[in-house]
Image (cartoon, rainbow, N blue to C red):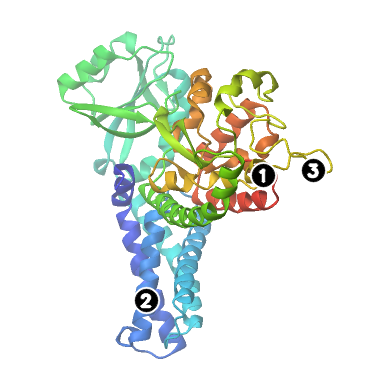
Amino acid sequence: MNKQVLTGLIKHGDFIALDVICLQLCYLASYWTNVEFASPYHIYGYRYQALVMLASQILVILFSNNYHGIIRRPWFDELGSVFTYIVEVFVIALVYLFAVHWAGEASRLQFGITCLYFMMLDFLLRQAYKWFLRKRAIADNKRHSLVIVTSRALLGDVLQQLSNAKAYQGFFVSNIVLMDEAAPGEETIEGIPVVSLDQDATAAITHTWVDEVFILQPDDKPFPSDFVDDLMEMGITVSFSLSGTRFSVTDTGKVGPYAVLTSRIREVSIGQVMVKRLFDIVGGFVGSVLTLVIFVFVAPMIYYKSPGPIFFVQKRVGRNGKPFNMYKFRSMYLDAEERKASLEAQNRVDNGLMFKMDDDPRIIGSEKRGKNGEPRGIGNFIRRYSIDEFPQFFNVLRGEMSLVGTRPPTMDEWERYSLEHRVRMAIKPGITGLWQVSGRSKITDFDQVVRLDREYIEQWNLGMDVKILLKTVMVVIGARGAL
């Protein structure tokens, strides 16, 4: 499991245990009010329903973000969080029970009553427990002394953020060390003693109570190496953060023997990654079966019009620049790649970062025209309904692609990318994606493609993938251009 996710679950283990116990108590109470004053667990049907609710609750705990920021959450946000929590449990459990055609003794009315009880009781229990944590941490002798080291520009936000959490984290800010030059006559900020690094901060805090030093490193100041060396010499715990700067630290870990801070464009839980890969495996398998069926009908037509390989294999760039072989049904003549250079002037996308062309003569049978002059060849038919894309389901099964992602560029396109363009391949490429269903072949501004791809990466969730897949089906059925 992802270290960050595991740490979060352990950190909020008390709230998780509280919720698990609360749900079972509410189930017991609903049985008492709806059936009889006895234990429901001795009856198979009710015991089975209770286990389904427990399993659904565990899934919500692992794959949702319900516990993030729970300690700092105000009461009205907590009420909404509890509502979302029980709805997710309720939906997962009901979907399962309907899927298995469950018709046991346990009524769905009791199920609903359980959820109603949980809404009320769990909200009160969470609020009461947070009140208890707050009261327990008020006495200074149960907290530890924290020294803040940062710049004047970041200090206000640091104090505000820490003040929201300090009652629960068990610390109080005892001193402030500024990386800026000292202001004349400045001795305190918000009642907290303050000193500047250039005033010999080490000497200033040597004779005070210091359990931990927190350093928020700004972009425009040098790292206080000498000061940190002094702190380590004294055996004081030093914590570093790059939050609030241009660096987005998402994880900590090790590279060989070296402790490192890790930055990513987006951090997702291991549960989300597992579910996405599961979707890919199921979708890849179904798509691969359909590909074999389509092959029976399409292969003879391709070969008849253009003798040669049925599949087109091209080197593409995958996640983080790793090349792989992408498979497609061949919709172009065998010399298509050689003719591409001579057609570059007709490319509708500037700078050659992608190749989009109206009425491409390289497409098999494109010389055949309909009544309105539009190309009617087998290759045009294959591309219009995105049939050529189906062999990529084999790439999905192999783990080189995903059902939804960013479209993989060719090797020559990749070489032309600037730094901001390369963000497209920070994730696994997909058969379809956000920009394809936002305009598909009509989009000719590559910067717009990059903006949509970045939006997908930064805002990704499983629900977004489902929406994109549904839109893709509609787009393909409507034959509105190639993916």
Q: Amino acid at mark 2?
A: Ala
The tag earlier along the polypeptide, 3 or 1, is 3
Q: Are marks 1 and 2 in contact (CB under 8 Å)?
A: no
Closest to the observer, 422 or 354: 354
Residue placed under numbered mark 1 in the picture: 384
Mark 1 burial class by Cα count in 10 Å: few <14, some 14-19, many 20+: some
- Answer whether residue 427 is visible to the viewer in this image: yes
Residue placed under numbered mark 2 in the picture: 50
Q: CA distance from mark 2 to mark 3?
A: 63 Å
Horizontal relation, residue 345 to residue 462: left or right: right
Asked which quadrant contains residue 213, the reply is: top left
Q: CA distance from mark 1 to mark 2?
A: 51 Å
Callout 1: helix, strand or loop?
helix
Q: Amino acid at mark 1?
A: Arg
Q: Amino acid at mark 3?
A: Gly
Q: Is residue 183 above or below residue 42?
A: above
Quick one: which residue is furthest to the right in this view? Answer: 372
Q: Is residue 349 above or below residue 285?
A: above
Asked which quadrant contains residue 167, the reply is: top left
- Could you say where residue 355 lies in the image, as x and y percent from the top left? 61, 27
Horizontal relation, residue 424 to residue 438: left or right: left
- Answer whether residue 239 is visible to the viewer in this image: no
**What residue sits 46% from the left and 80% below the top?**
101
The tag earlier along the polypeptide, 1 or 2, is 2
Residue placed under numbered mark 3 in the picture: 370
